[in-house]
Image (spheres, rainbow, N blue to C red):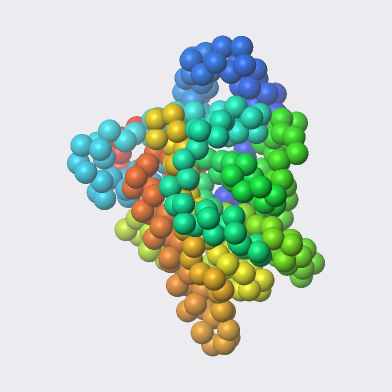
Amino acid sequence: MADAQPHWSRIGEAGTLAGLRFLVLVYRLAGRAGFRVVLFPVMVYFYLFRHQARRASRQYLRRIRPLLPAGQGARLTSFRHFVTFGEILLDKLLVWIGRIRREDVLFETPDSMRELRLGQGGGILVVSHLGNLEICNALSQQVPGISLTILVHTQHAQKFNTVLRELSGDTGVEIMQVTDLSPATVMLFAERVRAGGYVVIAGDRTPLSGRQRESNVEFLGGVAPFPQGPFILAGLLRCPVYFLFCLKRRSRYHVYLEKYCERLHIHPRKRRTQILDGAVQAFADRLQHYCLQAPLQWFNFYAFWRDGRAAEPGAQP
């Protein structure tokens, strides 16, 4: 049960700065084939010794299997989940060193992309830990002059972001470490949105500030907590809200940009909870839709659900 588990932000990061730099070096010297040779024993180690992540993977796969065709669900294992994470970790790094080419990224929603290009104001991009979040950097190539501010949690992302800062140049993308939406932070984001920028914020990580800013919604057959923060921020900024998803199929990334609303009105106060719950559920529904298309690409390796159903005994490894 999720309540018995620590908050995701208190779960230690796997890997070190030296380890991440080593992965980049392996790729540069030996390509993806050499990287996979190195990746396999690393993933075996993490699979064997990251017990909490392994249990969370099993819990997630147990929930998604019944929603998939029988043959597909039977092939899903936690170890394959870990290996897929390692592969996409490399892709995350490749985005920032300029090794993901424009033709490697397919934007599957041209109408939304056109609106983004022609829009005069900015907005909120609600993303998830499905696929490759760093592919957001591709937006800066497709939309000239676009400014993206990606919000991350300070402790959880610090190692990875240190490497990204070393690898990346001036991409129009800023990574900002924020633990709570203070009035000063909201004012800063308001200025950026008015200037036509977009704030990128994850919609599948619960807030540090406690349960008063989360909604318990239906997700993959159970009740799970999702953050209200992206939608509270959108209501305060009175700006458009988009959902952004990215899936890898074979060697190409497919990006889906969906407009949720032009303005999110979270007043009057007596309907605020209902409005926020509806927005959070809408995001959870779309996340489920894309998880079913690429079930091994959702990487939330911590206990997620709150309906009391533990991981399946004897589940596939």
Query: In the picture, residue 164 is in which quadrant?
Result: top right
Coordinates of residue 69 in the picture (x, y in percent) = 21, 43
Q: How many marks?
A: 0
Task: Tell me what residue is drawn at x 71 percent, y 34 percent.
Answer: 168
Task: Tell me what residue is drawn at x 38 percent, y 48 percent.
Answer: 291
Of residues 111 and 252, which is closer to you in this image? 111
Task: Tell me what residue is drawn at x 57 percent, y 57 percent.
Answer: 116
Q: Establish if 190 lies above or below 69.
A: below
Left or right, residue 168 beside residue 141: right
Is residue 311 visible in this depiction of the protein? no
Residue extending farthest left: 70
Is residue 164 visible in this depiction of the protein? yes
Coordinates of residue 11 in the picture (x, y in percent) = 59, 44
Of residues 14 and 148, which is closer to you in this image? 148
Q: Quadrant of the N terminus?
A: bottom left
Left or right, residue 107 beside residue 293: right
Q: Quadrant of the C terminus?
A: top left
Coordinates of residue 248 in the picture (x, y in percent) = 44, 37
Coordinates of residue 10 in the picture (x, y in percent) = 62, 48
Task: Tell me what residue is drawn at x 49 percent, y 54 percent.
Answer: 257
